[in-house]
Amino acid sequence: MKHKPNLSFWKLWNLSFGFFGVQIAYALQSGNISRIFRTLGADPHSLSFFWILPPLMGILVQPIIGTLSDKTWCRFGRRIPYLFIGATVAVAVMCLLPNAGSLGLGISAVMIFGLLMLMLLDTSINMAMQPFKMLVGDMVNEEQKAKAYSIQSFLCNAGSVVGFLFPFILTWIGIKNVAPEGVVPDSVIWSFYIGAAILILCVIYTTSKVKEWDPQEYEEYNGAGEDKQDKADWISLLKNAPSTFWKVGLVQFFCWAALLYMWTYVVDAVAETVWNTTDSTSEEYQVAGNWTGVLYAIQAMGSVVWATILPRFKNTKMAYACSLFLGGLGFALIPFVPNQYAQIVPFLLIGCAWAAMLAMPFTFVTNALQGYGHMGAYLGLFNGTICLPQIIAAICGGSILHIVGGHSSTMMIVSGVLLVIGSCCVSLIKK
């Protein structure tokens, strides 16, 4: 088996550049979905149910894309066809979703249309996101993988910052941030339009610059192709997965449940804590929505800085556990910080957890999977440890909100407790 050649910085950059556009789309979705559905008229107690669709699509789509792309060989490549199709669908949906309230439909029809668009958006984003992780695994040698994933992490966080800031920036330059009841403001609508344009341009750039290996070249550098390995269904793969796969998955459960509650309730929590309102028709609520986007962007920037500190820890488990604990502390502080600028501190702490969640789980799991084969299928299945916790959390969200008194700000404390539990579970992982 031949050693994979070293790639120049720009070749590594090109492998992941489209991830910048995909992450803008993902940031727009995660930062604005609750705001959109609340503006359309959704009740806070049922808000978490709207968040079942994104992880549900992820748990279905990512293993399928991983398995199919392991077996796909065509003139356009192995992973890139799925990337391009997913991005194309995402662009179309991003132009439709924020206009749900402008179509003259009744409230029930608006909600159904919005849910359908959300389902298609998350399906297409997952379809576009997964190939980037696999391209690095396919074409980058072991010595350069850390550098390649660092570039991907930088582009991921940079895309997040841009996507989260769009509504705030567009409002600042004069685009309307208020709209008639049940209609999404222009600042959000145009954010999705611009994000869609950037997404397709980034993906076109990657697909034009990256040429995947053909089956013969792939086998020379990676050994027998996935299609020539022993056949195994998902159940068999999960039965034979290393114990680290499941222990990291337990940590993931608490982490991603916490993140789901942030995405669902944080706009209401910030509006309630800082602007003393939960009225989604008020101008103050829309201002809180914009400011939450700024806080998300600060979280992403804090994540970039913390990612440079993580390698300085001699003990990777300690780095993982400490990062999650800091994130839990950040969540717990949100309801106790009534100043909008002071809210930056909790979100910087959450950024520490986010940096670790992006890097550490895949580091532990891919190291444990060396020699197992079926890497694409395993990574797709491992994404179930991201999606399944969100589905469970979304189902339970309304009941937990009722238990804590109906205050979205209190749900941030729930997220904090979940992250601290996840931090404790890191001790179960064996390197």
Image (cartoon, rainbow, N blue to C red):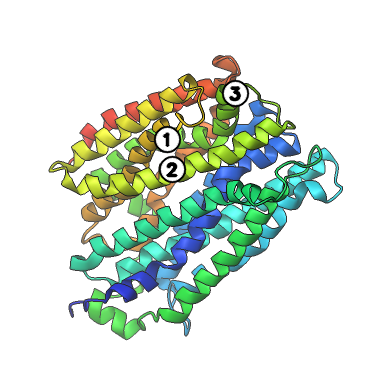
Q: Which amino acid does label 1 sit on?
A: Phe
Dividing the image into 4 quarters, which one contains the C terminus? top left
247 or 302, nearer to the observer: 302
Residue 34: quarter of image: top right
Q: Residue at x 42, y 23 (%)?
A: 333
Residue highlighted by disc 1: 347
What's under tag 3, amino acid-wise?
Glu
Q: Is mark 3 on a helix, strand or loop?
A: helix
- Image point 47% across, 51% down: which residue? 161
Image x and y of residue 204, in percent = 52, 75
- Pointers 2 and 1 in contact (C-beta within 8 Å): yes
Q: Residues within 10 Å of mark 1 (few under 14, many from 20)?
A: many
Q: Position of residue 71 (x, y in %)?
A: 42, 72
Q: In this view, does 33 lie above or below 25?
A: above
| Residue at 42% over, 35% down | 347
Q: Name the residue under label 3.
A: 272
Quadrant, the N terminus: bottom left
What type is the residue that disc 2 sits on?
A: Ile
Which mark, residue 298? 2
> Which residue ends up furthest to the front in the rendered image?
173
Q: Distance between the residues labelled 2 and 1?
A: 7 Å
Q: In this view, does 266 lie to the left or right of 136?
A: right
- Indicate whether 420 appears above or below 249: above
Mark 1, secondary structure of its residue: helix
- Give x and y (percent) for residue 192: 64, 55
Depth check, front residue: 381 or 200: 200
Q: What element carries label 2?
A: helix
